[in-house]
Image (spheres, rainbow, N blue to C red):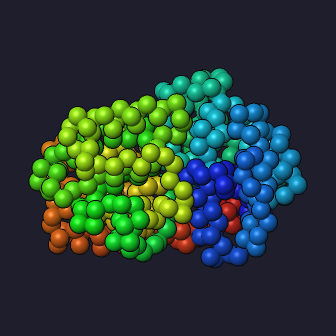
Amino acid sequence: MKIAHLSTFWPIGYGLSLYTDLLIQGMRAHRPDRHTILAEIGSAPADTEAYQCIPCYRRDQDYVEPIAAAAAAAQPDVLIVQYAKDLFGHDNRLPRLLTRLRELGVRPVVNTHSVYPETWRSGYRPGHSAAAFDRAVAESASLITVHSPRMKHDLITRGVAPDRIAVVPHGSQILPEGDVAQSRTQLQVPQDAKVILFFGFIWLGKGIEFLLDVFRGVQRQVPEAFLLVGGHTRHRRWALYVSYLRARAALLGISGRCRFWGGFIPQDVVPVVRATADVVAMPYRQDYSSVSGVMHETAGMGKLMICSRIAKFDEVELNIDRGLTVEVNDREAWIRTTVRLLRDEEWARQMKEKIRRFAEETSWENVGKMHGDLCQRLVEGH
């Protein structure tokens, strides 16, 4: 069975590059087939024992024929599309591509990482809605994979047939917690601090302004608390927002115990940043169904977490512990739970055990097997 992936890839540093790399590793743990990556131009051509990377398309152009030509040359049995709106658009191109791939005898699987509210506007015609786009994708694909039952439910309610959707969790990379003292020395974070980490791209939907208010309340009870905001905005034109957050921290009187990273964190530095944390905070506000790669990475390192009680963190509430999720705007509950994670050693130990168990259940090896089994069934005609 020959598997191909449609995605960004290294050295493009978006999450889909890492996701695709880890998924290939997880799938090859069970079937050591060599994979093909049909990658966005800007990815580096590569030819290794594990995969061949072929840059072939641009996200801002009509990518249908360039990708179809690359797929015709590679001749995969199954092509897994790592769908993200900013990579493949929310218009007619992806449904056209999926139809073209099926004409070539390729079975396209769309691994969609977010399901947007059905009334959201899209560029897809006719309909100009997220629901119309999702129905068109489902009609053209061999299979849609999503990461949570809620995502499947949301697709079904807009008219996608249940048997065209499979739920496969996001993978967790199992890693050691890291050397806390060494990491803090490297990043110049106080050794005796109780470090709360925010990690990832910064934008309004991540709730960082709210987190600053929460941190001020936490520090009043835990004077040694320290807030590290790791990451930056996806686009430089939004950097003014980070300047505003720094000014807000100064206004709140917490800037002496708060540090903003100030830029993109290279992949080789990510484990160092994560290792500094006592608790990873995810106060997100997204009003659509998806899951969090940051949460899975946090679980994979066995780190404590506190998350908003929204669809994105259904897994935390249902599969780890509801006590690690808090209502979005309940500032006092956020303060209370964060302080408990930092001070109540027995409860923190119990939560860490549950987090590690979840990470093992959703390891990339397990998730890779799920994807591989689905591909095998497609090839066999089931």
* Pick the front one: 100 or 232: 232
* Pick the front one: 26 or 133: 26
User: Residue 356 location in percent, x, y?
Assistant: 36, 71
Q: Is residue 360 above or below residue 18?
A: below
Give the image quarter of residue 216. top left
Q: Is residue 344 visible?
A: yes
> Which residue occupies 50% across, 53% down?
265
User: Residue 332 location in percent, x, y?
Assistant: 14, 44
Q: Is residue 182 left or right of residue 215?
A: right
* Pick the front one: 101 or 194: 194
* Pick the front one: 43 or 105: 43
User: Residue 305 location in percent, x, y?
Assistant: 31, 59
User: Residue 115 location in percent, x, y?
Assistant: 50, 41
Q: Is residue 159 left or right of residue 193?
A: right
> Which residue occupies 67% across, 63% down?
375
The quarter of the picture where the C terminus appears is: bottom right
Give the image quarter of residue 361. bottom left
> Which residue occupies 75% across, 33% down?
61
The quarter of the picture where the N terminus appears is: bottom right
Q: Residue furthest left?
A: 221
> Which residue occupies 29% across, 52% down?
227
Q: Is residue 308 visible?
A: no
Q: Is residue 369 above or below residue 256?
A: below
Total numbered labels: 0
Q: Is residue 288 above or below residue 273?
A: above
